[in-house]
Image (cartoon, helix red, strand yellow):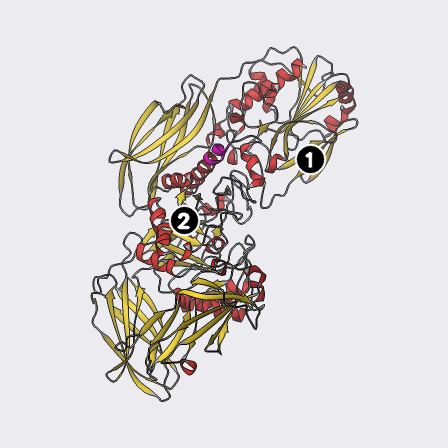
Amino acid sequence: MDPNKSHNETSLNGQWEIAGGSADDHQPFHSYISVPSVVDTALPPYDWQSFDYHWYRKSFSLGNVPESVNVFLKIEQSMFGTEVWLNGVHLGGSISCYTSHEYHLNEFLKRDGTNELVVRVGARSTLPPESAVGRDQEKEIYTPGIWGDVSLTSVGEARVKLVQVIPHIDTFTAEVRVWIQHLGQLQKSLRISAGVFEKNSDEAVTPIQDIHITCDAHATAQVTFQIPIDDAQLWSPEHPFLYEVELSIFDNKTELDAMRTTFGMREFKIVGPDFFLNGHRILLRGSNIAFHRFLSDGQRKLLPWNRSWITKALIDIPKAHHFNFFRNHLGQLYNRWYDIADENGMLIQNEWQFWNVTGTDTQIRKEFTEWLQDNWNHPSIVIWDPINESTDETVQNEIVPEMKALDPTRPWESVDFLEEHPYIYSLGMVMNHRTFGFTRSLKAIEQLPVPSMVNEFLWWWFNDKWEPTVLTKMIVQRWMGRSYTQEDIIAHQSFLVQELIELFRRMRVKAIQPFVYISNNDGPTAHWFLEDIKDLQPKPLLKTIKNAFAPFGVSIELWDRHFMVKQQYSVRIFVFNDSHGVKNGKVKFGVLTSDNQWMSIQMIPVDVPPVSDIVIEVQFILPNALDDWRVVAELQENDTVVAVSMKPTLALYEPAVPQLQKRVVLFDPSGEIFSYLSGIGISIEEFTSTRFEQSTMVIVHGNVIGNSVYASRRNEITTFLKNGGQMVLIEPEFRVVGSVVQHIAEGLDLKITHRTDVDKGGYDSYVFTEDQNHPLWKKLGGKHLKLFNGAIGGEIVSQYDVDFSLPSQRLASCGIDLNVVAASEIEYGSGKVLLFRLQLRGRLNESETGKSLFARRKDPVARQLLMNMLEYCDAV
């Protein structure tokens, strides 16, 4: 303690003793622990999970502190439930787990000797029911501890208790609200002085202002300074300029306290459908940090409190990958993370650990108020977020408005706008046209009158050894099939994040954050690093995200995968500019071979306005050869490639028309199959009048088995099949409502059930064969059964369960765990019935409506599948 200073701070961080125990007593102190941390870092380790309470002990001395000096203990963050003793006297406690609490030590402080400080923390289960600790359904182990900094502060007879700086960038004025606590026994007149300094240079940038107040004994008074800052430098991710306001309290000429508070001159707000930073539109790009889940990571150790590691994790790697924004997911970070974000320019959405609300309204108000007061001067924190994937009438409609009055400088998620969690192309379908889980439809997101934010997507979580997490296991086969390699998994993760980020950028989503950058490697969502987390070795997807997030970026709008050789196709290319200056460059567009040779090239100059995009339409033709072509757009700036968009394309020839021996009997109310087959010269006979013979095959398209026409001929169908006939049912579930049982033939039914699939599943766009050598898949490989042309997300199999009432042979599967029948066949008498659910409708004939993005259109794979069906039935 410096006797020449009115304000002294002494850190109590470092080594403490620790022992497990009960609420009233503890084991002998045989272990040591570093503060801040959590109890599993104690050395030597002890069985911390067998104790409900953990007792910390530390000795300190201040060196003959005068009686006129007031000393306060501050514990910034501790959990779960804290009680404090000084020299054997209980000072009090707090059940707040994420916010600071302090204790006035004067009465029991040994001013010229050694003091013993004891702090007890509890297990989460020991918290009272009024606690606002929250919950995380994906976290099993909650490790207690003093996880924030601990310090002593010494001041005179009055102190600066609390400071709030509200920047007004339009007038370059810092509004400084100050709470002065008078600690003396008598009313006193005080002079409060304020001045602003540059944080790094310590140069004064304003004159000193004084305000005189009269403060009653043991009272707290509030004063407000309006401090103009000439030529103020605004804080932003690109220019994280920081100021300090120094506040001093004088009793006549005696200084009682003097402290500095860091702040930045920045304004963040919502204007219509946009976020604005310092008067300019800003697009937020980044990810999520699940700090409290990371506390359960087996490799975590003391890393969350290591400044150099934090800087690398929060700043260096993200900025190198075009991040400017993080949401700390479900719970406050260790406070120094915010300091580092302030100093280096990283924007943060600060989320409370409410995945469903816990606690009483009174306690929530108390802890939310502490939360704001602890953090409201951080320029890096731009959004408050009270709740995740749930709603609460009191929190959102009563408590948050009260908090907005305390801090009018930031929007609140779930009140001013709503985040979306579109776990599409993974847990869900490729694209959602309806509410799915915790997201609205993509169209609804695109049309929001407030800023759009997708801050959870990419349900493709693998640990550092590329083992699927518990939440990922059920969906891997849905997208990879039954046989895949580690390389396939890695490549798909990168492919998926590129596709989805490009989609959301084309939708002009204002905040895009795939999930999850840092979390528990052994938990349900893992993280994005390989091997030991201390080394922060990024997984390959971060390189992909860097390309997808390129501020001067590019995206080809193309979902189709199947193309005819030597035919011309049109696509749109989006060129993005997230910066605040005009961007000029060139797009190199063309077709690339599987070995990266350009087969065609177009060079297109582009000029993109600030924080905007342009759309250009181009044409391409696939060469007259079968290859895994790629349509590619390279964006160049100053002859350097800054971003790439690449879409897989499969070239196919027009299917050969089979020479059939059997006659084709067709029941197709839509007329589409009839039109296509007739157009290529295959004779068709009407279902209603044709006699079923062994020289015929029967094709039934759509939901027609239950109608009167089919029912009138069911007995004939039964005889036809028993005598060796072949029948194909193509998408019999089309437009079935609810669940039905349809009677195909005597003793043979088809069970059709529409699945609700509220938060997982949905339609399928990837289908996997059970036997690739089956004639049904002739001339096609597994790659051809992914995303048919047209329809939302290239839908192939609809959101139904369909199967025969009798055991059948599965020919193709899809869906979660590949539990959905996509195609199957069953022997009936001497004949066979083939169930074929892959959607051919809208994909056989040319159509003017097929020119819109999600309209169904000609697909050579659909045509080939129909030809294969005919040949298969003809040959049996």
Magenta stretch: includes residue 42: no
Number of residues whose C-alpha sits closer than 10 Å to that of mark 1, classed few (under 14), some (14–19) or many (20 or more): many
Q: What is the number of the mark on residue 872? A: none
Work out how far the residue at label 2 is from the one at label 1, CA to CA, in angstroms.
52 Å
| CB contact under 8 Å: marks 2 and 1 | no
- Quadrant housing the N terminus: bottom left
Residue 117 % position (x, y): 44, 73
Magenta span of residues: 485-490
Question: In this orientation, which residue lies closer to the viewer: 86 or 322?
Answer: 86
Q: What is the number of the mark on residue 534? A: 2
Q: Is residue 236 above or below residue 148?
A: above
Quadrant housing residue 72: bottom left
Three-letter residue code for mark 2: Lys
Residue 473 % position (x, y): 57, 40
Three-letter residue code for mark 1: Ile
Left or right: where 868 falls relative to 262: right
Residue 155 % position (x, y): 33, 78
List the residue tagged with mark 1: 752
Res. 536 in view: yes
